[in-house]
Image (cartoon, rainbow, N blue to C red):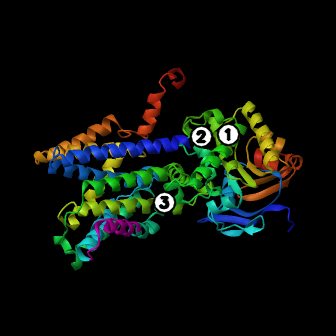
Amino acid sequence: MMKKSKQFWGFTILAIAIFVAIQFMISGGFLNNFYSNTLIFMAINIMLAVSLHLVIGITGQFSLGHAGFLAVGAYVSAIMTMKLDLPFFAAILIAGIAAALAGLVVGIPSLRLRGDYLAIATLGFAEIIRIIFMNMDYVGEAAGMQVTHLTTWTYTFICLFVTILVIVNFTNSRHGRACIAIRENEIAADAMGINTTYYKVLAFAIGSFFAGVAGALYAHNFYIIQPSNFGFLKSIDILIYVVLGGLGSLSGAIVATILLTIVSTFLQDYPETRMIIYSLVLIIVMLYRPKGLMGKMEFTDYLKMWMRPKGGSQHEQ
Amino acid sequence: MSNNVLLDVQSAGIQFGGLKAVSGFNMKINKGELVGLIGPNGAGKTTSFNLLTGVYVPTEGEIFFDGKKINGLPPFKVTRLGMSRTFQNIRLFDELSVLDNVKVAYHSLANDSVMSSIFRLPSYFKNEHEMENKAMEFLKIFELDKYKDETAKNLPYGKQRRLEIARALAANPDLLLLDEPAAGMNPFETKELMELIAFIRKQFGLTILLIEHDMNLVMGICERIYVLDHGVLLAEGSPEEIRNNPKVIEAYLGEEIV
């Protein structure tokens, strides 16, 4: 019990330190607009990666439709602030709830499927969501919707902190263990009294909720949102973060997201070769770290290994 | 029906397309009994386990557990009613630690909500603490406590089998179904396992139904034996009766040439 709360406070202090440091750099003018925007974009990507990690890495349900929930969050929040004049934080919350509901609607029928079949079904649902927005006059059809810039570093960081905290706490509880049991062996999980459908849908809904929250920040970080921002390729981008980091590792997803966001930001200066170099990075990482950057390990696992190297002789296998 | 009957299977069966895998399967198990289910390969033993535990829905007949009709219930509900099982081909949660494997079995016995685990409310810590203590008790009985932080897939085969039984037991069953618990074990390990089964049965007041090929084990500890062949019940009786039943001898050894 003590160990768990120590971990929590360690995490909180680290988060506050990062926040204060970056806030100081932004207000002190050390970071120009370009860099602070990149940081916000990075944080949004981390939220997307971490929420998909819960679905794919923890529960083992292969979803290819995460951009669909991002779209729901983005559009719902934009409607809230632009058409209904609600405050931004309310719009963020409503966006999350709307995306979670969309997650339930998509998840309940499609989570009966497994593996490749589930991937295709979620892909289909995400496309349906995108096409609905593309044909809705209310949100500007294919031309998109004007959105005021409201996303700040503070909003983004608080949302990121809550996302990681909730997903870590969920994972390290009996509910999270049930989800991992489903990933490891669904038949055995069922035989151990776990309602597998319930937990698959629950993980999917929580993942969708945070994708929706990320969507709200995403929408208000640019001045316009268009259905084409939320296509199949966006889902693949998020999937790459999770796979490259190591399926099942939350820290891995974060590290991979930071790395890839930096790579793709710096490659913007070389538009002709950008996608080639980006793809090469992916290929090289997968060749040298086939299980992802972190495998199934977390930062805390490395810390534990690092803290007791003296008993090394007991550690051989 | 007397109150003493825990499991009552009434001419249950299942058909896959045109194939009748099991049909007209009758079985009555009283509380506290240790019953064996034997038969040649492909006789339908594991299929009948899958019928009992809800993995398959029977296409004929009815199954009563503790007086409640259970055919058609999903496996997790059957487990919660008090029937848990092991698998012929070990199905552990490979990437979870040995301790967590057992803790998963406590899942349905704990009552902290999703919200209390997300917000780390007191009920989360209380439940987690209880689960850990109880899981450790089981690991001690099965002499697995010193491997508690080991990843399950790294355990040697015999210990994986024991862990699977520990996990099934942690789900707090009245009826424990063991599917070939001694498969792949050497005679010494089998003997140890027999003693362990006898011990847990007494300790937890369990009723046990086991599938086994090792005749020493079956004849040694089972009080009653059912014999399946080609999906049909061939015989039922005490080990002595089964040993001398000509039909059973024929199914196992082939017909005698006169």
Q: Which residue is mark 1?
A: B139
Residue A200 is tagged as: 3
Between A58 and B233, the one nearer to me in the picture: A58
The three-letter amino acid code for the residue at tag 2 is Val
Quadrant of res A244:
top left
Question: Disc 1 vs disc 2: Cβ atoms closer than 8 Å?
Answer: yes
Mark 1 vs mark 2, CA separation in Å:
9 Å
Q: Earlier in the sequence, mark 1 or mark 2?
A: 2
Q: Is residue A75 left or right of residue B228?
A: left
Residue B98 is tagged as: 2
- Whether residue A135 can be seen here: no
Q: Which residues are magenta?
A: A84-100
The three-letter amino acid code for the residue at tag 1 is Leu
Q: Residue at x 46, y 63 (%)?
A: A111
Mark 2 crowd level (few <14, some 14–19, many ≥20, 10 Å Cα): many
Q: Residue at x 59, y 35 (%)?
A: B155
Between B256 and B250, the one nearer to me in the picture: B250
Q: Residue at x 29, y 69 (%)?
A: A87
Residue A92 belongs to magenta span: yes
